[in-house]
Image (cartoon, helix red, strand yellow):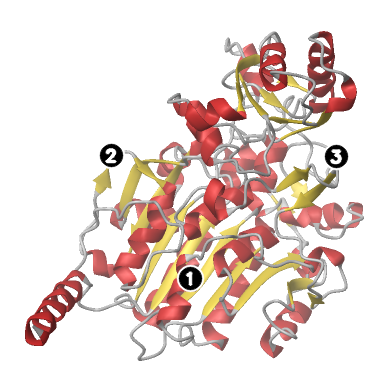
């Protein structure tokens, strides 16, 4: 019997080994481009000359990749990428959410039990404590007995922490002091990063002009700047932008910077520095190191000027060249056989509805405060006293539970449906049981901390400023993002048209690396050819 069991274990082990790539990667570079719609790969493809062109020509591209939750925000998106599951299980249901027990709103990663590192800002009191699942980077650290190095960088704390997970070596994000962290990960910044922050301070990047990267004639005809919100520090939403004037006009010393291509440049520069100083990918271990990068400047400029603006296009053309620099560095210093790249996005974005309305689409925008006021009036008119209406946020209504008011959730749902901008509304019970795919998105995006009634505006309509754009819905323009795997171990480049989920990335990487899937993972392994 013992010999039989030994044979079975040996047979299973041999199958597992055969399923692994002949040469496992020494480095995984995980890239998230904040607010990158899937169509940005094709809309600007004729203008790409660098990293995006490399990915388009040599990558394994999944053209029909979608998120399976709503709301579609930065934190839930990043957490889903790295945990391989939905917010209902990984716990990050929004960037921030209302807590009925104390009547306050909590930020997804805030942790008062931590201390800032590299800054005095209270906004560095952050940790992954609210992420309830392991990430694939956590599982890698466990499997390698902490021999793998995991470093994550972003302009946003949520872009870095969700990637580094609970056991990563470091998560760094940007404030006006430079790249910072919290004592959850370390007691002090690495010496090389302290030096980087001194030599690569924000002011040093904000000189010269941001103008068209290539001849303006190559850009699509500009629709209108009427619906573009003027970037912070600027006098108008139009090229060129004097970077030094933007910096001087910005009292925060950082927000204007984050909306320019320089925001992506500093991330590239620190990525090249950490690769060099930490010798990422240069080892003889079985398991790889990880460099996780979340490029946030694309999101900041997208919110300001929208998805059709020349600023957004130019931002992506410059990111294309910046990624090219990164890929060349990896080829020359890590070796083209020794790394893989995975690129995706945390969410998409809508067209500016006012612009779309001029072009004939039945879309519209609403100021969030006005929409809330109209909702409240409808609910009160339906018989629910104002004191029982606690909060409106994340396309949800929070109510004070009261046994004397029967069917309160249904009454509120029906009241919201009377609003001309509302396409659908559901009670919490309905999203738990309904086969409706849009209800399922909200089920996947909620947990017991969520509200009691959920609603959706009509497609293309947003509750936001009249200018710029936003994201958060369960419609395709917010859920559809690129997924690309790139590296020599894949052997070939293919275009995949089957519908996949973003939560499939984590189990696929777990399979490639030969590690356990994250603890709450419910994604599927993608069909990738591996040498």
Mark 3 secondary-structure assignment: loop
- Above/below status of 283 relative to 470: below
Label located before the other in sequence (2 or 1) = 1
Give the quarter of the image for residue 12: bottom left
- Above/below status of 91 relative to 152: above
Residue on which disc 2 sits: 497
* For residue 143, side relative to residue 8 (left or right): right
Label 3, label 1: how many angstroms apart (C-alpha)?
43 Å
Mark 2 secondary-structure assignment: loop
Bin the neighbour count of mark 2 within 10 Å (Cα to Cα): few under 14, some 14-19, many 20 and up: few
Bin the neighbour count of mark 3 within 10 Å (Cα to Cα): few under 14, some 14-19, many 20 and up: few
Which mark's residue is nearer the viewer, 2 or 3?
2
- Above/below status of 401 relative to 333: above
Quadrant holding the C terminus: bottom left
Which mark's residue is nearer the viewer, 2 or 1?
1
Callouts 2 and 1 close, C-beta under 8 Å:
no
Label located before the other in sequence (3 or 1) = 1
- Residue 269, given in percent of the width and then of the height, sits at 61, 72
The numbered mark at residue 137 is 1
Which mark's residue is nearer the viewer, 3 or 1?
1
Residue 317 visible? no
Residue on which disc 3 sits: 235
Label 2, label 1: how many angstroms apart (C-alpha)?
28 Å
Residue in front for this viewpoint, 418 or 49:
418
What residue lies at 68% left-to-right and 16% top-to-bottom? 364
Residue in front for this viewpoint, 9 or 26:
9
Label located before the other in sequence (2 or 3) = 3
* For residue 231, side relative to residue 334 (left or right): right
């Amino acid at each position: 019997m013992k010999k039989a069991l030994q044979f079975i274990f040996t047979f299973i082990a041999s199958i597992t080994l055969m399923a692994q790539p002949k040469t496992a990667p020494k480095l995984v570079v995980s890239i998230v481009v904040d607010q990158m719609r899937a169509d940005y790969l094709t809309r600007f493809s004729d203008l790409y000359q660098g990293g995006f062109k490399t990915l388009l020509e040599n990558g394994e591209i999944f053209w029909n990749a979608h998120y399976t939750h709503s709301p579609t925000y930065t934190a839930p998106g990043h957490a889903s990428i790295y945990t391989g599951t939905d917010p209902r299980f990984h716990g990050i249901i929004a960037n921030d959410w209302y807590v009925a027990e104390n009547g306050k709103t909590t930020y997804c990663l805030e942790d008062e039990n931590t201390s800032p590192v590299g800054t005095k800002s209270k906004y560095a009191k952050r940790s992954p404590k609210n992420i309830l699942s392991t990430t694939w980077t956590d599982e890698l650290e466990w499997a390698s007995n902490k021999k793998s190095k995991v470093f994550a960088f972003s302009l946003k704390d949520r872009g870095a922490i969700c990637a580094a997970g609970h056991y990563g070596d470091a998560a760094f994000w940007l404030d006006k002091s430079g790249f910072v962290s919290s004592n959850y990960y370390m007691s002090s910044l690495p010496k090389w990063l302290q030096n980087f922050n001194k030599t690569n301070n924000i002011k040093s990047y904000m000189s010269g002009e941001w103008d068209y990267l290539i001849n303006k004639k190559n850009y699509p005809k500009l629709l209108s700047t009427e619906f573009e919100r003027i970037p912070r520090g600027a006098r108008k939403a139009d090229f060129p932008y004097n970077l030094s004037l933007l910096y001087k006009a910005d009292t925060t010393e950082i927000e204007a910077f984050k909306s320019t291509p320089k925001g992506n440049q500093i991330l590239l520069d620190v990525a090249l520095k950490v690769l060099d100083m930490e010798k990422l990918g240069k080892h003889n271990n079985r398991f790889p190191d990880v460099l996780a990068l979340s490029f946030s400047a694309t999101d900041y400029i997208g919110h300001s000027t929208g998805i059709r603006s020349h600023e957004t296009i130019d931002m992506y053309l410059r990111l294309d060249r910046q990624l090219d620099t990164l890929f060349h560095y990896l080829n020359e210093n890590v070796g083209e056989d020794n790394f893989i790249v995975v690129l995706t996005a945390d969410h998409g974005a809508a067209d500016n509805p006012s612009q779309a309305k001029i072009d004939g689409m039945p879309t519209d925008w609403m100021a969030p405060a006005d929409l809330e006021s109209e909702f409240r009036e409808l609910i009160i008119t339906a018989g629910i006293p104002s004191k029982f209406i606690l909060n409106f946020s994340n396309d949800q209504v929070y109510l004070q539970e009261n046994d004397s008011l029967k069917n309160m959730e249904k009454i509120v749902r029906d009241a919201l449906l009377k609003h001309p901008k509302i396409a659908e509304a559901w009670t919490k019970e309905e999203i738990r049981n309904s086969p409706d795919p849009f209800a399922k998105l909200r089920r996947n995006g909620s947990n017991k901390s969520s509200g009691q009634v959920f609603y959706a505006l009509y497609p293309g309509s947003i509750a936001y400023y009249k200018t710029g754009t936003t994201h958060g819905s369960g419609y395709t323009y917010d859920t559809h993002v690129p997924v690309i795997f790139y590296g020599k171990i894949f052997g070939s480049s293919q275009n995949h048209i089957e519908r996949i989920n973003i939560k499939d990335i984590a189990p696929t990487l777990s399979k490639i690396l030969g590690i356990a899937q994250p603890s709450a993972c419910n994604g599927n392994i993608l069909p990738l050819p591996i040498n």
